[in-house]
Image (tube, rainbow, N blue to C red):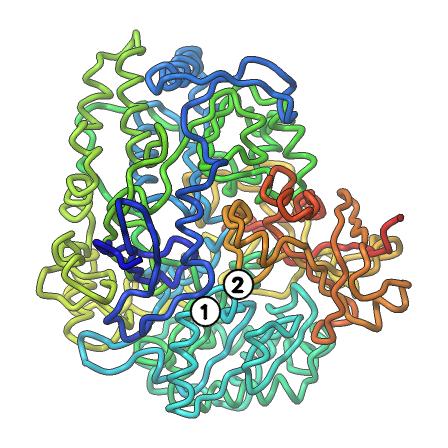
Amino acid sequence: MQPDRTVTSACQFCNSNCAISVGMRADRIISIQGGPGDPVQQGNLCVKAPMMAELVYSPLRLTKPLIRTGGRKGSTDSTFREATWDEALDVIAQRLLKLRDTGQAASIANRTTGRLPRGTGSLVARLFALLGSPNNTDVGPVCNDAGGNALKTTFGLGNFTNGYGTDGATGKDDLGSADYFLFLGTNQAETHPVTFDYLLRGRARTKAKLVVVDPRRTPTGAQADEWISPKPHTDLALALGMLHHILDEKLYDKAFIDRWVLGFAELKTHMAASGYTPQWAASVTGVPAATIRRLARDYAGAKSAAIFCNAGISHQLGAFDTYRVLTFLAAVTGNIGKLGSGCNFMHNTWPGDLHLPELAVKTPDLTQALPVGPDYFAESILTGKPYQLKAVITQGNPLISSANTEKVKEAFRNLDFYVYTGLFMEEAAYYADVVLPVSAALEFEGVYMRRDDRAIRWQEAAVARTGHSKPDWEIWIDLAHAFARNDRRKPASYWADAFPPAWKDYPTLWAEFVKHTPGMGGMTQKRMQERTEPLRWPCPTPEHPGVSALYQDHPSWYEAAESLGGKKGQRFLTPSGKIEIFTDALDKQLATAGHAALPSFYTHPEVTGSHPTLAYEKGFIASPINPQALTHPVQLGVKGDGRVHRDYPLMGMTGRPSVVHFASVTHWTPTGEQLNGIRLLQIHPDTARRLGIGDRDEVLVESPRGKVTATALYWPGIREDTVFLPNTFGPAQKVADQFDDPRYEAANTLVDDRYYDNLSGQQAYKCFACRVSKAPA
């Protein structure tokens, strides 16, 4: 069973972006092994990588386009007929053109997902510009837009600041050289196991301290020198308490601040008057004040300290403001722009905004987009505010990922026209008018997944496409040509010239991205194919090594910064060229939405303790962070009343089930279902016993929005007032039947969609009031 050839590819299942060597025999995949030569990966893989072959060979794959013929939307009794690609795309083009021709182009929306081949979103944006709709949204608001928004506001770029492995400019190790790691809301042992192993190897060498902040003791926390467990949704208070102590005790880097930081004096004045002391933070978070003071001292005193965050921070009501305070911690201690440090807010990756040649035709003027975040789709469909969506295309599954699932179901039942693209008949597909089958990652070449540190790999196709499936970028090019065939108002060239058929060849399309995207001139297909390590952006020339640590005081960074539009010698890509903690312009900009450049504390109203929260105003304004979109202004500091906890006394969080799963796609593999097909609710044993719940009892979890089922798992390493409910399970996941596992309703049934970060659009998945009881027999 030796392969007769091997194919170089990359794993699609997380942002570790592991190289894989796909063993082929008689054109069939017979093995998947870790790619050699990458010093970060060291040939390692986690359990997920071999599951890529299971996606290719799954008998449940969609293989042909489908058009609805009957049945109630959302019902599994819905009926569809097979169609040709031209027929299916013509149906889509005709429906969307009719909306445009009746002045309703803005009623058309698309939602992309992180699973797309790089650059697909650029094609979507191009088509929507020609169509005249502003609502081409991405996955960021359910992933990590807030971190990117905060990084860009403070430092100038919205990206993970440092890199895994060797810095090409200096030949020295980057993140592995840190002597202090502060993890907040990130469980990398399960979510990014291979790059986390690299960090652990560096820690063993440098004796770095690892501190993990999370309401539950995750496998990452089990590796830590110290695990700190605040209440859910109170990380902003913890960060403010740390910052207050650093400023009060003068633990900051004065020389760095004097040269590179703007607004430090205003920050000191604000914090001195705020009362955000460690003692105050302890009263909010439940973390002892002595612990917060020690955390602040240790972080500020480290030679090189690296902050890591992920969805635990992003999925909070005050995500943008929390991330901003974390950037302040790095700025005032000088932990930015040097190796082994930085604000490594995960999933703020690149490439994303890939550029194509300017359109040669005049496009319609755009109205403002709906409030940022695809979770606003349901509100728009059901209420018509600020205007009503009539047609939606998704590359993700909103029936799993969106908050308040029952409301989303109602909305998609009432939606006039819906197109679902995907690998399987997921929950959302049963609401669709047209279903389009996409190709799996091993079925095409190009750039697919990316590593958190802005690094990408070229992957080769291993097998032929399943059935009549197509890769996503090709679908959008073909859809543009369907518009050309069906448009009676614009000449065919309006669409066809903007989407040359040659771009269906991904290497040709990639060459366009390299040519037109700032900071990308060195990231050619040839160069990536010759490397065993991924290549990091920015990389402006073929000779440039790529940037590991952004903002490093080094000629290599200044060259890259200039390619991104900075002035010669400009270190930080902000308007001032410095780190911007406070400016009058920024303060006025954020004030339009109810915020300020120097954040104040507030949290979700369903956090126990009646803390300051917020209230949303009824009207809309242009978002100060995403000005192309609308948002609700807010009033901060509104007193919470805690009434919800009379009936729902616990705080719930959602998150990834285990290392086995990545989003919902792995639930469609036999390995994923075999290893983790039961939804295990982590609950403290003392809490469970008080409620009469035994370990592995079937339980009912209820919130004011709805109820779902799970199996109780006694977990001593979780706060007694908190439960953790794994997400990504869904009722359409047929592989569960092979193991007699339940078909679970989506965890997001419990989450309130009304509460979101009005700056970034992040939904607040990390706190919902709930109660847990033993399920009826």
Q: Amino acid at mark 1?
A: Pro
Q: Amino acid at mark 2?
A: Val
In the rendered image, which quarter is residue 536 located in?
A: bottom left
Q: Image check: 318 left or right of 687? A: left
Q: CA distance from mark 2 to mark 1?
A: 8 Å
* The label number, if any, that marks residue 14 in the structure image: none
Given the current orientation, which residue lies at the most extreme left position?
A: 543
Question: Where does residue 267 sit, x and y in percent of width and height?
Answer: 49, 74
Residue 637 appears in view: no
Q: Is residue 98 above or below residue 431?
A: above
Q: Is residue 262 above or below residue 495?
A: below
Q: Identify the image quadrant of the N terminus.
A: bottom left
Of residues 327 and 488, the one drawn nearer to the viewer in this rendering: 488
Residue that carries the numbered disc 1 in the rendered image: 193
Determine crowd level at label 1: few under 14, some 14-19, many 20+ residues with C-alpha closer than 10 A.
Answer: many
Which secondary structure, mark 1? helix
Question: Where does residue 116 sit, x and y in percent of width and height?
Answer: 37, 43
Of residues 37 and 3, the one drawn nearer to the viewer in this rendering: 3
- The residue positioned 50% from the left and 54% from the top of the image is 662
Residue that carries the numbered disc 2 in the rendered image: 659
Question: Where does residue 286 sit, x and y in percent of width and height?
Answer: 72, 76
